[in-house]
Image: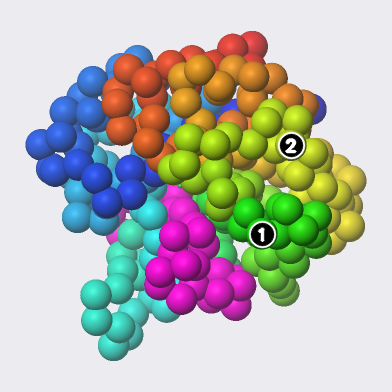
Amino acid sequence: MGRRPVIAGNWKMYKTKDEALAFIYAINLSVPEKDVVETVICAPAVYLRDLVQREEDNLRIGAQTMHHADEGAYTGEISPAMLKSIGIEYVIIGHSERRAYYNETDESVNLKVHAAVNKDIIPIICVGESLDIREAGTTNQVVEAQVRAAYLNMDAEKAMKTIIAYEPIWAIGTGKTATPEQANETIKAIRGVMEDIYGKIFAEEIRILYGGSVNVKNVESLLAESDIDGALVGGASLDPSAYLTLVNAALKKAS
Ligand code: PGA
């Protein structure tokens, strides 16, 4: 099938500027060829320009969120046009922390996904269920609704320029990882939704990542699953050598 694996680090609100630069220098020349593994670091907005200027060819820098409008009276916000103008190629959209603390909704996620692809920025679209929903047995329905909402009114050509990250909320930052089988099963269900909207070939090509307490110990077993194409990683992406271990696991999957 040949889906290129993706390892995306999500630094959240961590690292000073010096720490951010030191990290980039530490991994810059050690990441695999970009045609084999997509290696992305989603950093705090204040450092994006500094990091883009220092990234070598195989490393990619992404943002953690953005507004959907290109400009406007939105104090404190950052637009897709601004990100594009400094060379940003990826953006996380709809992370569960943004949904929980900053009122992001399925509707705003949809607007942002459109805005990103229209600017040729690859959105990493986060979906995932809470523990209550997992326990109630309605995970697939909830995740399906999030996925359908994110892609509302989007044609297949644009949708192919996106990446999905399945991140069960109960697994984020908790040390509780979904088992590889649980993660794969939900990701397969998401692929089924993609097939329903865009057809079989599309569903086989779209990349779907797992996120939630991915670390150097569990990464290989997660990536060994058929439908998991990589990882969106918080905590374990803060340390350069841990991050490179994750990237190397993806390299193994690719080869
Ligand atoms: P975590 O975060 O790896 O620290 O659980 C994942 C995420 O929030 O994307």
- Residue picked out by circle 1: 132
> Residue visible at 45% across and 31% down?
39
Task: Name the mark nearer the viewer: 2 or 1.
Answer: 1
Residue 239 position, x and y percent, is 29, 26
Displayed quadrant of residue 42: top left
Tell me which residue sits at (33%, 80%) in the image.
71
- Residue type, mark 1 in image: Asp
The answer, for residue 60, to whether it is visible in the render is: no
152 and 101: which is toward the camera? 101
* Residue 186 appears in the rendering: yes
- In which quadrant of the rendered image does the C terminus lie? top right
Q: Which residue is drawn at 23% across and 20% down?
A: 26
Q: Position of residue 242 (x, y in %)?
A: 37, 20
Amino acid type of the residue that numbered disc 2 sits on in the rendered structure? Gln
Highlighted magenta segment, given as a residue range: 84-112
Helix, strand or loop status at disc 2? helix
From the top left corner, tell me how far across and down residue 108 is, in percent: 53, 75
Res 19 quadrant in image: top left
Give the residue pinned by disc 2. Answer: 182
Q: Which mark is residue 38?
A: none
Q: Does the magenta stretch include residue 63?
A: no
Q: Residue at left 63%, top 54%?
A: 131
Say above or below: 149 vs 26. below
- Residue sitting farthest toward the left: 18
Q: In this view, does 83 lie to the left or right of 181?
A: left
Q: The N terminus lies in which quarter of the figure? A: top right
